[in-house]
Image (spheres, rainbow, N blue to C red):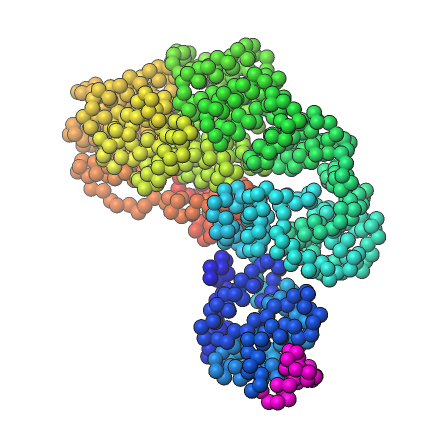
């Protein structure tokens, strides 16, 4: 049987069975929360023992807990024919207990008879006795089994029982006990994925977080989360429905408690945020005495946090307590809590409790809805988008006016989108449109439908939706943002005509600059116009303001900047990177998941251009994980594209091929040419660096082939130097000359240092005689060219190869040594090998140095992400929240990081340079 995360428990049980096979008996109580997997472990043991054991099983139930010897009857029924072989008094006693005769005997004799029967069975083969849910065994059966358990240690008999509580006292207090704990995050994900193999990543992520490692919850919640089932709890972070089997298991524990104690539990279930003092005061209002609180606190369901708050040990327990309570009781409890709330959290919590009380009464209430809306605004201002979305959804439900309901739903949809809850956002948009017009909802949600279409759908459709909504929204600043996104969508589609149309409509919508960031509009005309404009002479007027503007951009206004590949093409990556770094640092302290993913995805291409490949890898992997968790495949693809480029530069052709295959399968049908172009570029670059020039050229020329699914002007410019080199190696000089003209036009238009340098490089490859060296020197000496280390090193390599062929070996060695150092630092294995070969051809005898201390060879990607966040001072809980892992998993990763880096504390992490190669600062 495949039990996820139970290897230690399985091994312990296997050892007990092996001991019985050697003649040694054992008895064990397997205990843990309902649904934690105790029965699954017993099934595993029974299956393991089936071949060579006599297996006897019974299970306690509430219905039969008052029937004397009901469990013993179930346990012994398969071997009742053996009872006649017992001594006559014992046989009569046992038959009487099982109801097969009218004989009456005391319980001692019945226990002796059962013990004798077990021993006789064990003379033939080992015996396995399994009693599930021992807390529900009828008392006579339980006493009989306890009597036998204490006397079977020297017999080949194993007795296993399960229960909810640690057997520290009572009937089973002398038994060996094994607690079954929650599954770890990874095992929980594996189980959820096995239960629902076709569920999307967002469902799996929510399920794992909500189930808190409970296997039964994972099985039942996966389907309920996928179906959108919600609980009635007003304060629930994950609004989910508890499944029937888990509900029955928890309900059974509640029914054993007194009514006042159940009210105390309901009070704790109704508010997991208030402190103990608030709970006690609300209890006074409800008439809960000390005895009821003591019973509730000793029930095993509650725990006290270090901060003094009372909470359920498992949120699913609280969900059952709350949902099983009558509506009138819930209303009374919420009103009691609202009446006693004081302190800094009162304004946040009181509206929720009042709303819950009103809902229990089944009527709308504008005053409570208004309080919820104000609470949502405060939460949103602090970056609590998910909380704001929940508050606005509840406020809409309580709104008497449909106009108010539509406004609150539209704003809530925007908040849900920013929190990464796309399905919730779409659902709230649809409900809002049921109350008001699509035009009004577009204005209220700031064009959210187009943004969602861009992230999850077709870019051409998104562009048209965004431009339509740009004309609908009243605020010119919002219109500017939507127009900018429409231009991005058209650019992603590689649709020049649509891009021109979107720009024209934006200029008609905003003819004058009287709105925030209006000074960016002239720059947008330059960035998004496909031909003409600009030039080196007026570059200062076009690009110089960028750095100043970026210093004041905040929130989502950075989307007014061009997408990362276009920024790299314009040569403004440094300024944009600094703005995005500030934005990322700010977003890490909020739950604005969508914005965080957008910034991470954008930084990958900028990190690559600046030679920070280790950082690029870490950001890409983190962004990919978060994007997959929210289902934003567009942002996930941006991260994947960066990883594919890095794989090509590092010689990992398998990864390049895998990423490209996914891109072509997914993005070609959706018409996202920028990703198709990235796939072809990565494939072509990989083939070029592997020495397959003709194959590389066949791939790279597609970037400029009119009508091809990979044709994209920005990617074509960025790949032009690769295409030219491949063309010359393949003997296609005319194609290389076309690439030189493409680069020259772009360099003249933008004045970008990299483009000017690349133009000189391609001219050097095309030139002959003295002009060749002149062009190489010009390429290397362009001001700012060194800011692209990979490109600069590649120019040195090509220059060194030319110098070596010109028999200027000393000069060649200088250029090649510089190139080799950069390639080694970056991990660019193919070009490093090519450089080393050239160095040897110059007659240089290389000393094979030990490999550079590469971050990827020291830390795993997840360890690197954890270490970087810990170095910034984040706690394990804060790190876990950002990376979607548990604080315990964070601690595990840090325990691996410290010895790998040779440090002993978190303070030392602040002194680590996490750039390319790891070393202590100072």
Residue in the foreground of this view, choosing between 92 and 9: 92
Q: Residue at x 55, y 55 (%)?
A: 215
Marks counted in the figure total 0
Where residue 459 sits: x, y (%)? 46, 26
Residue in the foreground of this view, choosing between 649 and 675: 675
Q: Residue at x 78, y 48 (%)?
A: 329
Quadrant for residue 661, please give it.
top left
Judge left or right: residue 703 versus residue 408.
Answer: left
Residue 758 appears in view: no
Residue 150 is inside the magenta segment: no
Judge left or right: residue 333 versus residue 406.
Answer: right
Where residue 66 sits: x, y (%)? 71, 70
Judge left or right: residue 626 versus residue 693.
Answer: right
Residue in the foreground of this view, choosing between 242 and 702: 242
Q: Residue at x 29, y 28 (%)?
A: 700
Q: Which residues are magenta?
A: 86-109
Residue in the foreground of this view, choosing between 491 and 458: 458
Residue 107 is inside the magenta segment: yes
Establish if 905 lies above or below 703: below
Where residue 895 sits: x, y (%)? 49, 53
Residue 648 appears in view: yes
Q: Residue at x 63, y 82 (%)?
A: 94
Given the current orientation, which residue lies at the most extreme bottom position?
A: 88
Establish if 120 lies above or below 789: below
Where residue 165 sits: x, y (%)? 65, 64
């Amino acid at each position: 049987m495949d039990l996820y995360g139970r290897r230690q428990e399985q091994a312990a049980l296997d050892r007990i069975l092996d001991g019985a096979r050697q003649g040694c008996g054992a008895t064990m109580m397997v205990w843990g929360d309902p649904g934690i997997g105790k029965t699954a472990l017993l099934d595993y043991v029974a299956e393991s023992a089936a071949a060579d054991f006599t297996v006897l099983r019974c299970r306690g139930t509430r219905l039969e807990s008052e029937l004397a010897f009901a469990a013993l009857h179930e346990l012994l029924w398969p071997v009742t024919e053996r009872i006649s072989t017992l001594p006559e008094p014992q046989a009569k006693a046992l038959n009487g207990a099982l109801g097969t005769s009218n004989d009456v005997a005391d319980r001692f004799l019945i226990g002796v008879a059962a013990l004798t029967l077990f021993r006789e069975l064990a003379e033939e083969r080992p015996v396995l006795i399994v009693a599930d849910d021992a807390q529900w065994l009828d008392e006579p059966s339980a006493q009989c089994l306890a009597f036998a358990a204490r006397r079977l240690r020297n017999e080949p008999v194993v007795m296993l029982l399960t229960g909810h509580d640690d057997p520290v006292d009572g009937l089973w207090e002398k038994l060996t006990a094994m607690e079954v704990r929650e599954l770890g995050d990874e095992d929980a994900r594996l189980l959820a994925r096995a239960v629902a193999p076709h569920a999307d990543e967002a469902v799996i992520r929510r399920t794992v977080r909500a189930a808190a490692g409970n296997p039964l919850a994972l099985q039942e919640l996966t389907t309920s989360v996928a179906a959108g089932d919600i609980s009635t709890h007003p304060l629930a972070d994950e609004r989910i429905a508890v499944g029937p089997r888990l509900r029955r298991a928890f309900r059974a524990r509640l029914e054993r408690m007194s009514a006042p104690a159940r009210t105390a539990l309901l009070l704790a279930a109704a508010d997991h945020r208030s402190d103990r003092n608030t709970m006690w005061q609300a209890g006074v209002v409800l008439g809960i005495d000390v005895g009821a609180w003591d019973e509730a606190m000793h029930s095993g369901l509650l725990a006290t946090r270090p901060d003094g708050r009372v909470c359920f040990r498992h949120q699913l327990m609280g969900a059952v307590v709350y949902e099983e309570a009558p509506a009138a009781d819930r209303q009374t409890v919420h009103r009691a809590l609202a009446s006693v709330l004081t302190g800094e959290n009162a304004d946040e919590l009181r509206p929720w409790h009042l709303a819950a009380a009103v809902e229990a009464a089944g009527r709308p209430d504008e005053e409570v809805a208004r309080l919820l809306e104000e609470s949502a605004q405060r939460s949103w201002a602090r970056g609590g988008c998910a909380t704001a979305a929940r508050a606005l959804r509840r406020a809409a439900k309580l709104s008497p006016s449909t106009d108010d309901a539509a406004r609150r739903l539209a704003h809530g949809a925007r908040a849900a989108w920013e929190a990464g809850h796309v399905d919730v956002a779409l659902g709230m948009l649809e409900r809002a449109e049921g109350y008001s017009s699509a035009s009004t909802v577009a204005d209220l949600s700031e064009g959210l439908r187009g943004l969602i279409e861009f992230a999850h759908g077709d870019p051409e459709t998104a562009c048209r939706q965004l431009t339509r909504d740009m004309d609908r929204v009243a605020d010119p600043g919002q219109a500017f943002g939507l127009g900018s996104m429409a231009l991005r969508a058209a650019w992603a589609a590689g649709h020049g005509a649509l891009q021109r149309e979107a720009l024209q409509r934006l200029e008609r919508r905003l003819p004058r600059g009287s709105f925030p960031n209006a000074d960016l509009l002239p720059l947008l005309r330059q960035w998004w116009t496909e031909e003409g404009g600009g030039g080196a002479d007026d570059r200062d007027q076009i690009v110089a303001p960028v750095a100043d503007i970026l210093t004041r951009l905040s929130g989502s206004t950075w989307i007014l900047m061009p997408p990362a590949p276009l920024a790299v093409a314009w040569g403004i990556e440094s300024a944009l990177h600094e703005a995005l770094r500030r934005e990322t640092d700010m977003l890490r302290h909020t739950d604005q998941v969508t914005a965080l993913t957008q910034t991470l995805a954008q930084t990958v291409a900028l990190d690559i251009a600046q030679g920070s490949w280790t950082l690029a890898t870490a950001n890409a992997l983190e962004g990919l994980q978060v994007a997959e968790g929210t289902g934003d495949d567009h942002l996930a693809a941006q991260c994947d594209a960066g990883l594919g480029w890095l794989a090509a530069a590092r010689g990992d052709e398998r990864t390049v091929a895998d990423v490209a295959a996914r891109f072509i399968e997914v993005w070609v049908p959706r018409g996202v040419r920028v990703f198709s172009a990235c796939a072809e570029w990565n494939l072509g670059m990989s083939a070029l660096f592997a020495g397959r020039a003709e194959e590389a050229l066949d791939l790279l020329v597609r970037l400029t082939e009119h009508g091809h699914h990979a044709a994209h002007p920005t990617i074509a410019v960025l790949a032009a130097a690769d295409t030219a080199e491949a063309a010359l190696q393949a003997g296609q000089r005319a194609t290389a000359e076309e690439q030189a003209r493409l680069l020259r036009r772009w360099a003249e238009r933008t004045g970008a240092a990299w483009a000017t340098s690349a133009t000189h490089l391609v001219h050097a490859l095309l030139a002959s005689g003295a002009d060749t060296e002149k062009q190489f020197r010009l390429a290397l000496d362009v001001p700012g060219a060194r800011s692209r280390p990979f490109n600069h090193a590649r120019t040195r390599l090509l220059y060194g190869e030319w110098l070596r062929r010109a028999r200027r070996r000393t000069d060649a060695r200088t250029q090649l040594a510089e190139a080799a150092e950069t390639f080694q630092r970056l991990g660019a294995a193919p070009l490093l090998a090519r450089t080393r070969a050239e160095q040897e051809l110059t007659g240089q005898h290389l000393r094979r140095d030990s490999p550079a201390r590469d971050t990827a060879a020291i830390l795993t990607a997840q360890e690197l992400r954890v270490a970087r966040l810990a170095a910034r001072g984040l706690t394990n809980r804060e790190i876990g929240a950002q990376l979607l892992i548990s604080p315990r998993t964070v601690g595990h990763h840090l325990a691996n990081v410290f010895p790998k880096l040779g440090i002993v504390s978190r303070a030392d992490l602040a002194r680590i340079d996490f750039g390319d190669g790891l070393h202590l600062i100072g």
